[in-house]
Amino acid sequence: MKVLVVGGGGREHALIRKIKESDKVDSIACCPGNGGISYDADCYNVSATDIDGVVKLAKEIKADFVVVAPDDPLVMGMVDALNKEGFKTFGPNAAAAIIEGSKVFSKNLMLKYGIPTAEYKVFDNPADVITYLKEKNEFPAVIKADGLALGKGVIIPETLEEAEAGVKEIMEDKIFGASGNNVVVEEFLTGPEVSVLAFTDGKCVRPMVSSMDHKRALDGDKGLNTGGMGTVSPNPYYTDEIAQECMEKIFIPTINAMNSEGRAFKGCLYFGLMLTPKGPKVIEYNCRFGDPETQVVLPRLKTDIMDIFEAINNETLSQLDIEWSNDSCACVIMASGGYPKSYPKGIEINGLCNGQLDGVTVYHAGTAVKDGKLLTSGGRVLGVTALGDNLESALEKAYGGVSQISFDGAHYRKDIGRKALNALK
Ligand code: AMP
Ligand code: GLY
């Protein structure tokens, strides 16, 4: 089988590494990929959002299966376009990807079907948002742009002034374009956060092992929100009992709700959960694998991932047993100096041989190979990842790897997994 993976970050690298383990796969292509991915797959210079370009590439290389990993092409309908040309795919169609593409859609869905989430109100003009926040006078408030915003569309203002500034940026200055035409204002929830990715063929839902993201840029959950500075799996807060409750109250009802709306979801559905004092609630849905959650979840997958993808494509997932290892896994992101604000590119990375290092797996998020040298090319650069018998040993190995890799300005959090370790005590 020839598999084409669309995307070019750490998540795609983790997917490609897992696909490479499959007996059924002869070769892997990736577009656009990145420097580190080029050691594992043939990279083609086609943008992940170029629907016509990806369909053309899939035809040219005669792909047997296409995995569409990022949110934008899914929401734009890349899977629909590929299916129309007869390609087998992994990922939801546009009708289902709206569960991530519109927060207004997902909040209304949860309300309609009784799926636990924060209380909310939808607004289409900035003055009404401010009037509402003034009347309510409860801070922190949570304000979310309706559409996709590179993971930056959520603001949690502590004061009315901060809220006014944020609403202006989203709804008037349109820093996220049309994504800010509508906003959702919702209740501020508290509790540990858990990421649960789930395979679903629209009929049955198979949650993967849980994980914990670390979204803030700096130690102690300080600094700006990022795409994620590191992950661990499993998430110790996510007990078997809570998993059972989520299955009954959130996972199955969501799959059923999407079916009832005529939007059967096939692919990986990401549940961003908060374990509040009133029970687990949905913070967000994503229509795809999380990044960097995938980097700690897939290393624990024992079943051939192509068997899972085929079963989802054929809607026979219920007939497949999916096995996971009992190991723990940790991923520490090494980022460019300045990230998540502006950062330099093209800085040489030292310490790796063919993009890898003994004892860990290095998933490449933003790297390029030029004249035989490995250079930085993005904000998140590397995800240094290790499995261990327990979380402590996985973290020790991952940080051991980090200490052997260097590039000018590199920054990483020193406390990935600390909260999880404390929860285990
Ligand atoms: P999202 O992009 O929806 O995952 O939001 C980004 C982050 O904002 C989440 O990981 C939470 O930490 C935080 N957040 C989102 N919604 C809420 C909420 N209703 N209450 C408290 N924190 C929230
Ligand atoms: N790590 C969060 C996300 O993938 O959206």
Image: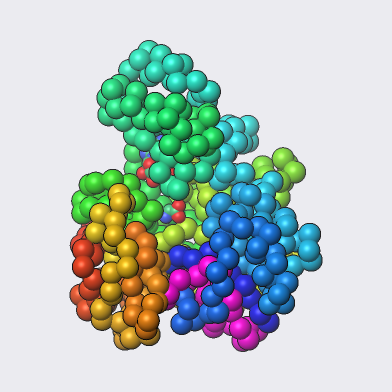
- Kindly indicate the quadrant of the structure image that contains residue 83: bottom right
* Quarter of the rendering occupied by the C terminus: bottom left
Residue 172: x percent and y percent? 44, 26
Q: Is residue 242 above or below residue 139?
A: below
* Quarter of the rendering occupied by the N terminus: bottom right
Going by the image, does 143 lie left or right of 18? Answer: left
Residue 167: x percent and y percent? 40, 27
Write down which quadrant ligand 2 falls in. Answer: bottom left
- Kindly indicate the quadrant of the structure image that contains residue 31: bottom right
- The residue that appears at 30% across and 51% down in the rendered structure is 342
Going by the image, does 90 lie left or right of 379? Answer: right
**Magenta-tinted stretch:** 12-36
The answer to whether residue 419 is magenta is no
Which colour scheme appears in the figure? Answer: rainbow
Going by the image, does 407 lie left or right of 322? Answer: left
- The residue that appears at 43% across and 36% down in the rendered structure is 175
- The residue that appears at 21% across and 68% down in the rendered structure is 408
- The residue that appears at 46% across and 33% down in the rendered structure is 174
Residue 384: x percent and y percent? 33, 72
Q: Is residue 52 above or below residue 401?
A: above
Q: Is residue 107 above or below residue 336?
A: above
The answer to whether residue 13 is magenta is yes
